Image (tube, rainbow, N blue to C red):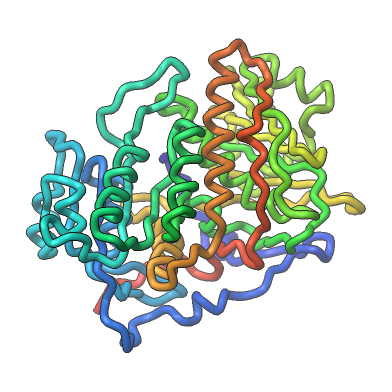
């Protein structure tokens, strides 16, 4: 993904109260328990199944943190895990997987099965599936055919042969295809192993630090973003996750989606004039983003793209790609009985550190230890499904799509788990 430039410390630490419904409370209990204290348990043995391993790839960031640690709650945190084996599906010219494995005493394997234990069967405690980046074709809908499902199935085959299973984390989508995503969730339920997936956006820092309580009376939510790197699917998924982490907290929980439609060009502005999404929310979402460009949105943005989500309970959701106007993710939502929108920027510290991977890795570690995700797999199941149908709508002349597959119900966790406090790096001693 692309990244924002850094906020100064004063801007980052500033927070505001919103309508008495937003909690600006301090760190989570989990954050307070991080650090370098020794653990009475032995390190978890982890296998990583990657598409590629190059500088600044998702595998580089996630596996690197599992091996080297990362800053959490203001101190250097070294995960109580041991990355023992790695399999990389592709070996491009800029592949640094062999070097990283040699430097960190990680066995580089030639198959998924070998990474999980080879002829001795499953001998790891958890599995990372990080299939992002690499040379993969596009289908007719403009989706990258990342083999997340295929790698997942190979892991499951090892589970079946071994007679036991372990937690799996899948980076980003479950699959570009909603039917395959559904199979992955069903398999985890049938075989009773923990499955966690998704983007780093829901758990990154927020400016200001706002958290809607469960059962917040949301009537509409909107996410702005601005990225132009290849197929729209790549960043639409991040935007949909950014929307869903707020909208799932609405009154009654997640009720599923009635209809999804992708619009492009003048049709986006026309939809606002028809009241299908609110211009005031767009302005509120952009307000907290320091990358906000000068000039009006309509004049600057040449080719807007929006996904309109109609939830079963009548709530409206929208994500809008405004390439010329912003390079960050911003959220704004309307609460019944209030006048001012709830709004924040989902802050992405810049590379090479890309520290938004810190909170994601923290939640992965907690999941691997407990076997229970900090947030429900149903969220990423729904966002994977929405992203699939959004791309199909765009391909099919921007027609709305209704489907039973969108009828996914679940309850939001008590805490969404987003990072709070300082993101300042601390080097290991």
Q: Residue at (36%, 39%) from the top-left corner?
A: 149
Q: Quadrant of the C terminus?
A: bottom left
Residue 301: x, y in percent? 60, 23
- Judged from this view, the residue extending furthest toward the right is 337
Q: Quadrant of residue 353?
A: bottom left
Q: In this view, does 307 lie above or below 359?
A: above
Residue 172: x, y in percent? 43, 45
Is 215 positioned to the left or the right of 53 in the image?
A: right
Residue nearest the observer in this picture, 218 or 157: 157
Q: In this view, does 37 lie above or below 43?
A: below
Q: Residue at (63%, 27%) from the top-left corner?
A: 306
Is 171 positioned to the left or the right of 232 in the image?
A: left
Question: Is residue 48 visible to the viewer in this orientation of the structure?
Answer: yes
Q: Is residue 98 above or below residue 84?
A: above
Give the tally of numbered discs: 0
Is 365 positioned to the left or the right of 163 in the image?
A: right
Q: Residue at (73%, 46%) from the top-left corner?
A: 255
Residue nearest the observer in this picture, 89 or 121: 121
Is 365 positioned to the left or the right of 343 in the image?
A: left
Question: Is residue 356 visible to the viewer in this orientation of the structure?
Answer: no
Residue nearest the observer in this picture, 425 or 62: 62
């Amino acid at each position: 993904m692309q990244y924002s430039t850094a906020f100064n410390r004063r801007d980052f630490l500033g927070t505001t109260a919103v309508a008495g419904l937003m909690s600006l409370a301090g760190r989570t209990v989990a954050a307070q328990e991080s650090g370098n204290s020794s653990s009475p348990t032995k390190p978890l043995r982890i296998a990583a199944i990657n598409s590629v391993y190059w500088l600044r790839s998702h595998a580089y960031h996630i596996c690197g943190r599992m091996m080297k640690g990362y800053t959490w709650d203001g101190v250097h945190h070294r995960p109580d895990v041991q990355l023992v084996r790695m399999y990389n599906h592709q070996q491009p010219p800029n592949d640094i997987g062999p070097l990283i494995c040699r430097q960190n005493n990680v066995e580089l394997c030639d198959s998924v099965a070998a990474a999980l234990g080879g002829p001795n069967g499953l001998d790891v405690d958890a599995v990372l599936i990080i299939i992002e980046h690499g040379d993969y074709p596009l289908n007719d809908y403009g989706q990258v055919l990342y083999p997340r499902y295929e790698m997942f199935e190979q892991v499951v085959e090892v589970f079946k042969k071994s007679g036991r299973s372990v937690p799996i984390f899948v980076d980003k989508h479950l699959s570009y295809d909603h039917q395959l995503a559904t199979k992955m969730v069903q398999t985890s339920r049938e075989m009773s192993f923990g499955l966690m997936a998704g983007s780093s956006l829901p758990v990154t820092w927020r400016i200001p630090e706002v958290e809607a309580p469960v059962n917040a009376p949301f009537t509409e939510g909107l996410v702005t973003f601005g990225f132009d790197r290849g197929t729209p699917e790549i960043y639409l998924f991040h935007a949909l996750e950014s929307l869903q982490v707020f909208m799932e907290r609405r009154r009654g929980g997640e009720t599923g989606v009635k209809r999804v439609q992708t619009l492009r060009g003048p049709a986006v502005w026309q939809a606002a004039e028809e009241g299908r999404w609110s211009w005031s929310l767009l302005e509120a979402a952009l307000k907290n983003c320091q990358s906000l460009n000068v000039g009006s949105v309509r004049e600057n943005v040449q080719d807007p793209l929006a996904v309109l989500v109609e939830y079963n309970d009548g709530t409206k959701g929208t994500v809008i790609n405004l390439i010329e106007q912003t390079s960050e993710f911003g959220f704004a939502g309307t609460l019944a009985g209030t006048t001012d929108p709830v709004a924040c920027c989902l802050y992405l510290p810049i590379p090479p550190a890309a520290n938004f991977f810190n909170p994601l890795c923290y939640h992965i570690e907690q999941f691997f230890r407990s076997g229970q995700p900090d947030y429900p797999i149903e969220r990423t199941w729904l966002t994977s499904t929405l992203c699939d149908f959004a791309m199909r709508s765009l391909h099919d002349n921007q027609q709305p799509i209704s489907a039973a597959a969108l009828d996914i119900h679940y309850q939001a966790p008590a805490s969404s788990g987003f990072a709070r406090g300082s993101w300042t790096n601390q080097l290991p001693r």
